[in-house]
């Protein structure tokens, strides 16, 4: 999807890369509303993929439930390597130091401030900070919200 940010800037995003623990899930649980938002994103043509260290060992079950693919990447360097394979039109959503590898190469990086916390080193690699995964996903669903946030 192409987002037309005020003042002539265009942002094209076709892939949304998610982290699992502390981002997509909170202490192993998927927040209510995530599945319906992922469905909307798929309907709008977005590829949604999970790159995870899989700390809790729940990635397979969660991704099956959400209908998304995943790859296990144990370090920020491994996540960065996987991110580079995905192309140039990716957004990344995460919360931890391990996500720096995805944030560095995303067209748009979003940090979630949920119950499992954030790592301060990740702050310098993100453009947007939101309270939850629901808010992060909603930015891609509501074009006006994303464009207003990015407005100069």
Image: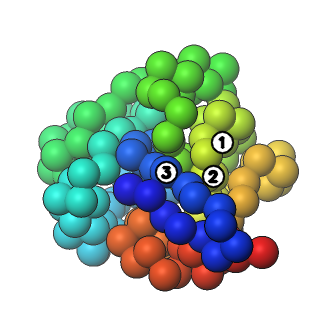
Q: Which mark is residue 12?
A: 3
Expressed as whole percent of the image width and height from the top left, the position of residue 67 reads: 16, 46
Q: Is 117 placed left or right of 57 in the picture?
A: right
Specify few, some or many for label 3: CA neighbours under 10 Å numbering under 14, 14-19, or 20 or more.
some
Q: Which mark is residue 4?
A: none
Q: Residue at x 44, y 74 (%)?
A: 143
Mark 3–mark 1 contact, CB under 8 Å?
no
Foreground tag (2 vs 3): 3
Under circle 2, the secondary element is: strand
Q: Is residue 59 above or below residue 120?
A: above
Within the image, what quadrant is residue 118 found in? bottom right
Q: Secondary structure at mark 3?
A: strand
* Residue under numbered circle 2: 109
Q: Label 1: state its secondary structure.
A: helix
Q: Can residue 92 be seen?
A: yes
Residue pointed to by mark 1: 103
Residue drawn 52% across the image and 81% down it: 145
Mark 3 and mark 1 lie on one chain; the one further toward the N terminus is 3
């Amino acid at each position: 999807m192409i987002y037309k940010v005020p003042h002539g800037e265009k942002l094209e995003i076709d892939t949304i890369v998610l982290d699992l623990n502390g981002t997509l899930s909170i202490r192993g649980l998927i927040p209510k509303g995530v599945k319906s938002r992922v469905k909307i994103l798929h309907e709008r043509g977005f590829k949604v993929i999970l790159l995870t260290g899989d700390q809790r060992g729940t990635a397979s079950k969660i991704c099956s439930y959400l209908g998304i693919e995943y790859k296990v990447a144990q370090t920020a360097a491994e996540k960065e390597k996987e991110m580079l394979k995905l192309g140039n039109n990716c957004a990344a959503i995460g919360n931890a130091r391990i996500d720096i590898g995805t944030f560095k190469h995303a067209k748009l990086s979003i940090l979630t401030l949920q119950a499992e916390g954030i790592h301060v080193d990740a702050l310098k690699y993100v453009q947007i900070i939101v309270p939850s995964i629901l808010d992060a996903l909603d930015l891609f669903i509501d074009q006006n919200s994303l464009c207003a946030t990015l407005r100069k």
